[in-house]
Every structure is written in structure tokens, then in C-alpha cells.
Amino acid sequence: MARFSSFLRNPFSFLFARSGKEERVAAYIIREHERGRPLAEILEDPYIRNRCTDQELARLLDQPEIVHALGESTVAEERDRRA
């Protein structure tokens, strides 16, 4: 019943919800970057390529937790490279 009541409070919340897949991919990107790998290399991993389209990757690079974890300049460089 809690889901229905939360839907009534914000009927458009589904537009901003992230999928479990996006959360797992974001966690993978952050974890691999913390291990010292460059972002461009991580984004070419089969794990990422098999799970995300280019549009989904662009959306992921806009997520605040990824920008915070990797740094604004790192994410901005990758956005520019992909544009």
C-alpha cells in the first residue's frame, strides 16, 4: 500500500526513477575508477558496452554521484570526447 500512497503524492516520480541496471553500472564505474582505471577505459569494458547504449552512458555521466566520485573535469573530458 505504501507504493500506491507514494504514487499519489508524486504521480510523475516514475519519470525520474533509476533502474537497478543503471545503479549497478554506476557503482561499477565508481568502483573501477577508485581502483585507478581511467574513465575512458572503464566505459569500453564489455560489462558497460553490453548493458548501456550511448544515450544511457550520457545519462549516467550526468548523475551527481558519478560526477562527485570521478570529478567534474574527468567527466567533462569524457563528455567532450564522446560528443
Image (spheres, rainbow, N blue to C red):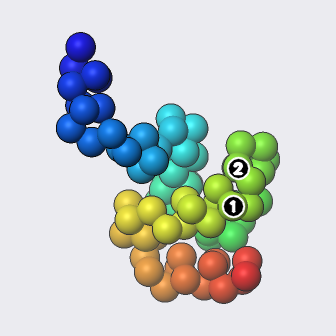
Q: Residue at x 57, y 62 (%)?
A: 59
Q: Secondary structure at mark 2?
A: loop
Please give the label number shown on residue 67. none
Q: Amino acid at mark 1?
A: Gln
Q: CA distance from mark 2 to mark 1?
A: 8 Å
Give the residue at mark 2: 52
Give the residue at mark 1: 55
User: Residue 60 placed where, x, y %?
Assistant: 55, 59
Compare residues 8 and 51 and report the one nearer the observer: 8
User: Residue 3 placed where, x, y %?
Assistant: 28, 23
Mark 1: few/some/many CA within 10 Å (<14, 14-19, 20+): few
Q: Residue at x 74, y 54 (%)?
A: 53
Would residue 30 be visible to someone looking at this image? yes
Considering the image in quadrants, where does the N terminus appear?
top left
Q: Secondary structure at mark 1?
A: helix
Q: Nearer the viewer, mark 2 or mark 1?
A: 1
Is 2 placed above or below 76 here? above
From the viewer's perspective, tell me whether residue 50 is left or right of residue 20.
right
Q: Residue at x 55, y 83 (%)?
A: 76
Mark 2: few/some/many CA within 10 Å (<14, 14-19, 20+): some
User: Residue 54 placed where, x, y %?
Assistant: 74, 61
From the viewer's perspective, tell me whether residue 35 is left or right of residue 51.
left
Is 49 placed above or below 10 here? below
Q: Amino acid at mark 2?
A: Cys
Task: Tell me whether circle 2 and circle 1 mark residues in contact (CB < 8 Å).
Answer: no
User: Residue 16 placed where, x, y %?
Assistant: 42, 50
Would residue 36 be visible to someone looking at this image? no
Is 5 placed above or below 48 here? above
Considering the image in quadrants, where does the C terminus appear?
bottom right
Q: Residue at x 54, y 76 (%)?
A: 75
> How many numbered dots are placed on residues in this image?
2
